[in-house]
Image (spheres, rainbow, N blue to C red):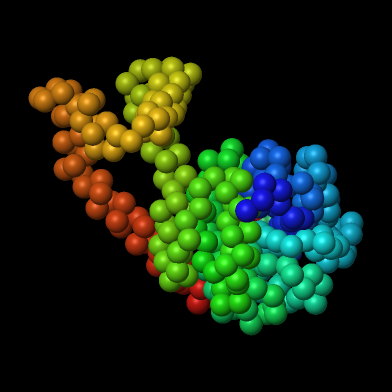
């Protein structure tokens, strides 16, 4: 895939669409520019990035169809319940060679293909895309050629890693990497609470915990050493860490993650059923 990407539209640039936008612009590869839309003028005005045309529906009723002009990749970044209405609205304004890419949890390829004639790709990105450390699952629709899928892959690779999977795996992927940043932040919050209860100041607790998460992640990223081995290196036989890990094992941390992701998966099935 050539380095430069064609023009991209992002319809709905909130948390997720905005994260993709920021990473994409930062990559410098969106050479033909990006058009983004939001409902409110305040939100549109807050997006001030080089090469980005930011439009608001509030002040420009045709913002979505205007954003589609010349766009070969159209990322739909609105809330899942709003996706069908948005696709109906834009169906007749898409360029013939545009690929429609949804980031919405629970909106199926069949639903999207029923609303637009263009090829569609369903994705599940995550918010570290903002700092180009995202991971995105891609599931190709029935009309997508391998070249079109490669183009969508190239767009998401500007903001992190990409995994191509079958659509029936995308909800499961969402419970790991889509929701995953929230799990990590929750773990950080919990360990920070413990540090505070141990008598550290707020600033000390934050520094100790946040630097530890960052340092451990970077240590993992720096080499090919699996996490179990890195953990072993911190865990001297019969030492202090070993006692702490034993408490976590007793609390069945792994089982808790199984239950948490099962709950998330059940919710995505409810959402797909319109709940
Ligand atoms: N957040 C995540 O971590 C995450 C991860 C993976 C996937 N997703 C998916 O990303 C999608 C968006 O979630 P989010 O958390 O980013 O929500 P969000 O922050 O509310 O973003 C949605 C954006 O869409 C805009 N919008 C609403 N209606 C619009 C329309 N008709 N045309 C153009 N723009 C419109 C909103 O603008 P205004 O605010 O101005 O109304 C808002 O900025 C969802 O489908 C979700 O499943 C999110």
Identified at 20% across, 34% down, the residue is: 245
Closer to us: 204 or 108:
108
Residue 212 placement: quadrant = top left
In the rendered view, would you say 78 is above or below 273? Answer: above
Front residue of 193/231: it is: 231
| Residue 184 locus on image (x, y percent) | 42, 41
Q: Is residue 209 visible?
A: no
Q: Residue furthest bottom?
A: 114
Q: Residue at x 47, y 56 (%)?
A: 163
Whether residue 220 is visible:
yes
Left or right: 96 as drawn, with respect to 245 = right
Residue 28 location, quadrant: top right
Judge left or right: residue 46 versus residue 134: right
The x and y percentages for residue 131 are 59, 38
Q: Is residue 175 left or right of residue 241?
A: right
Coordinates of residue 41 in the picture (x, y in percent): 83, 50
Front residue of 2 and 235 = 2
Report the residue at 53% width, 50% height from top.
126
Count numbered badges in the picture.
0
Q: Please state the quadrant of the image where ligand 1 appears.
A: bottom right
Q: Which residue is the extreme one toward the left?
A: 238
- Residue at horizontal 64%, vertical 82%? 114
Residue 127 position, x and y percent, is: 56, 46
């Amino acid at each position: 895939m050539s380095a430069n990407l064609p023009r991209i539209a992002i319809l709905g640039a909130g948390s997720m669409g905005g994260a993709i936008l920021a990473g994409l612009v930062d990559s410098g590869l969106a050479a033909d520019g990006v058009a983004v839309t939001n409902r409110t003028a305040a939100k549109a005005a807050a997006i001030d990035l080089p090469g980005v045309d930011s439009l608001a529906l509030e002040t420009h009723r045709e913002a979505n169809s205007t954003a589609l002009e010349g766009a070969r990749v159209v990322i739909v970044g609105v809330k899942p319940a709003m996706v069908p209405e948005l696709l109906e609205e834009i169906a007749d304004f898409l360029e013939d060679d545009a690929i429609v890419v949804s980031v919405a949890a629970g909106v199926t390829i069949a639903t999207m293909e029923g609303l637009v004639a263009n090829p569609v790709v369903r994705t599940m990105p995550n918010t570290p895309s903002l700092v180009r450390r995202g991971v995105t699952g891609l599931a190709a629709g029935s009309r997508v050629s391998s070249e079109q899928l490669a183009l969508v892959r190239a767009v998401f690779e500007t903001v992190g890693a990409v995994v191509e999977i079958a659509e029936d795996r995308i909800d499961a992927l969402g419970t790991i990497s889509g929701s995953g940043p929230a799990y990590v932040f929750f773990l950080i919050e919990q360990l920070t609470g413990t540090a505070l209860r141990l008598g550290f100041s707020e600033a000390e607790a934050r520094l100790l915990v946040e630097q530890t998460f960052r340092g451990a992640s970077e240590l993992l990223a720096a080499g090919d050493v699996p996490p179990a081995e890195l953990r072993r290196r911190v865990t001297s036989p019969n030492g202090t860490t070993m006692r702490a890990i034993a408490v976590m094992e007793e609390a069945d941390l792994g089982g808790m993650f199984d239950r948490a992701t099962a709950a998330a998966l059940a919710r995505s099935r409810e959402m797909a059923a319109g709940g």
